[in-house]
Image: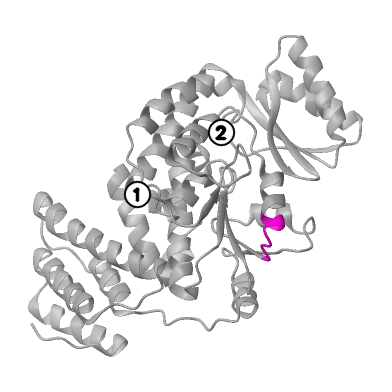
Amino acid sequence: MEKIAMLFPGQGSQYVGMGKALCEEFSLAKMVFEEASDVLHMDLKKICFSGDSKVLTSTENAQPAILTTSVAMFRVYLQEFGVFPDYVAGHSLGEFSALTCMQAISFSDALKLVRTRGQLMKAASDMHTGMMLAINNSDKNIVKEVLEKLNEQGNLVSIACYNSPTQTVISGDTQAIHQVESFLKRKKVSTSLLNVSAPFHSSLMESVAKSFTKHLDNNKYHSFKGKIISNTTALPYVSIEEMKRNLTLQITKAVKWSQTIGYLKNQGVTVAIEIGPKGVLTNLSKGHVQEMEFFSYDKGTDKKLLFDRLNVAPRPKYSLITRCLGMMVATKNYNMDTSEYMSEVINSIRILRNIQEDLELNDKKPSIEQMHYALKLLKTVFDTKRVPFQEQQKRFEKLYEETGVKYSF
């Protein structure tokens, strides 16, 4: 039997258009973006689907945008495959996506946390100019030696990520990063500046870590499902307190990603599925670990290969609860009373989404009572949105036709 790990990417994986095709195909994904926009009071769909790349790249936007895309993709994955992972790991910001999908943090709380995390990082980067540089195929001792010399001269620069056996990322002062870049170019070493707006995982983020700790302490946490690997230790979390502590540490400490992949390999993981935009982590790890096969869920060709590898048939796109959720989100609102909309519509969507998540995580089918309840919630949403009676009838008929379930009110 295959052992499966899920990998969640961090900042730098964002691109304009991410999540758009997913939302066009799956109402479940659209609902995730709608919820994120409601929680943060910003149009995340516009920022992700068709916004300015500079706006998306800005860290206070990129972090909630990547989290939302990853969570939407995870929920669609469960709907399509129904195979729960044995292990999960997230790269930097991706650790919040992993914790959210394993139910350690609620989606709404995670959105607020990463938005705050991004805002704090932006404020710190405005005070201290800095950047990050990826170094490829270089002797790590040479990199370490040049960093030590620069630090002795009063520069702030350090290793930020151990990404793979052939890639290390450094972070620090802009001037120091350019000095390293020039030195390595003379040594014929390949380097590339990362598409991020702050020097993450360095001592320049110390003020961020101190401020962010307070927000973590005030947040609510839950017992998590599955084994979640920490960035700072490359080992599974054993307690909520350890999780909170390491989420603070990862802001200033290096991400041990190469070690994380090594741990997963040693645990017998054979399939790693990247859940999030672009496929950066898949590209990082492919070819370095022969015992594991990597798939990017953002790539259609990889999804087809994954169905074959896991030997599962694609699940029907529309279960009754999924379809009810889709109709709740997609049906036009004719009610201008905002308070009524929030109390009835948003609350009904959240209740039904929680039922859906619980069913998917436990690989269960909805009971008759749950299906009846879903239909009643849908009727509540239609009535609150003041959808005309004839339109309601047509939508219910379409729902019954697609799902084979019928219920009379």
Residue for point 66% across, 62% down? 269
- Three-letter code, disc 2: Gln
- Image quarter where the N terminus lies is bottom right
Residue 308, above or below 25: below
Which residue in the protein does label 2 denote? 250
* Residue at which label 1 appears: 106
For the point 44% across and 67% down, the residue is 76
For mark 2, does the 10 Å Cα neighbourhood hold few (<14), some (14 to 19), or many (20 or more) residues? many
Q: Does 300 sit above or below residue 231?
A: below
Q: Secondary structure at mark 2?
A: loop
Does 129 sit left or right of 348 as displayed?
right
Residue 12 lies, with reference to residue 132, above or below; the image says below
- Residue type at numbered disc 1: Ser
Q: Residue at x 49, y 36 (%)?
A: 242
Q: Which residues are magenta?
A: 264-270
- Which residue is nearer to you in this view: 207 or 191? 207
